[in-house]
Image (cartoon, rainbow, N blue to C red):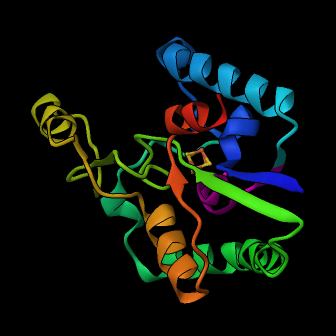
Amino acid sequence: MKSLLVLSHCILNTASKVMQDERELAEEYQIRDLLLQLILRKNIQILQLPCPEFVLYGSQRWGHVKNQFQHPYFEKASKEMLEPILLQLEEYDRHPESFSVLGIVSVEGSPSCGYHHTCIGEWKGEIGTDPAHISQIQGSLRMSSKPGVFMELLKEELEAHKLSIPILTMEETIELLK
Ligand code: SF4
C-alpha cells in the first residue's frame, strides 16, 4: 500500500511564491521543514499541484487578494490546470487496495491556496502616489475564513468527481502523520 499527499506547489518550490522579505515567512518555513521531514521519514509519496499565480502572472507579480482572482479567466485556467491532477486522483481512487490519498495540503493566507484563511480586500485599479489613497487600499486588507479561489475550485471539482479527500493545513497534516 502506498500513501500519498497532494501538496500546494510552493510547499515544494518556494521560488514560485510572491517575492517578499522571506523573514516574514520564518514561521511558515519552520512548519514546512517539519512537514517535509515527516513526509520523507514516513515514506509518503507526493503529488504537486500547479501554482496558478506563477503560471498566470509569473515571478514578477505583485501580491494579490482573493477578490482580484474572482473572475472567469482565472477560474477557467485553474480548472484546466487541475484536470490532470483530478484524473490522477481518480485513478488512485479506483485502486484503494494499493493507494491511499491522505489529503491535499493548503497554504494558509494565500488568496489562491488558502483553505481556512484567505486574504481579501478592495485592491484594484491604479495605486497612484497619494499616501491617503495607498493607505486606504492597504487598510482594506483582511483575512477571510473562506478558501482561496484555487482551493475553492478544487473542493468543487473533488465533489464533482466524487472524490472524498480532505483538504488540510500544513499543521493538520503534521498531526495526521505523527
Ligand atoms: S498560488 Fe498557491 S502555490 Fe502559488 S505561491 Fe501562492 S500559495 Fe503557493
Query: Which residue is situated farthest in the front direction here?
Result: 97
Tally of numbered discs: 0
In the rendered image, residue 39, in percent from the top left (x then y), is placed at 78, 33
As drawn, is 120 to the left or to the right of 22?
Answer: left
Q: Residue placed at 15% from the left, 43% from the top?
A: 140
Picture layout, residue 126 above or below residue 175: below
Q: Quadrant of the C terminus?
A: top right
Give the answer, above or below, for where 118 lies relative to 76: above
Q: Is residue 55 magenta?
A: yes
**Residue 24 left/right relative to 57:** left
Q: Looking at the picture, how far across and down is residue 71, in whole percent?
A: 40, 76
Query: Where the N terminus falls, by quadrant?
Result: bottom right
Whether residue 50 appears in this view of the structure is: no
At x 62%, y 60%, the residue is 52
Q: Give 66 or 131, whichever is nearer the viewer.
A: 66
Which residue is found at the position 35% from the left and 51% from the top? 65
Q: Is residue 92 magenta?
A: no
Measured from the top left, where is residue 141 in percent x and y? 22, 40
Q: Is residue 139 visible?
A: yes
Q: Is residue 14 left or right of residue 136?
A: right
Nearer-the-camera pick, 92 or 66: 92
The residue positioned 54% from the left and 48% from the top of the image is 106
| Boundaries of the magenta span | 46-58
Residue in front for this viewpoint, 160 or 78 = 160
Left or right: 160, with 44 as reference point = left
User: In the figure, residue 135 lies in which quadrant?
Assistant: top left
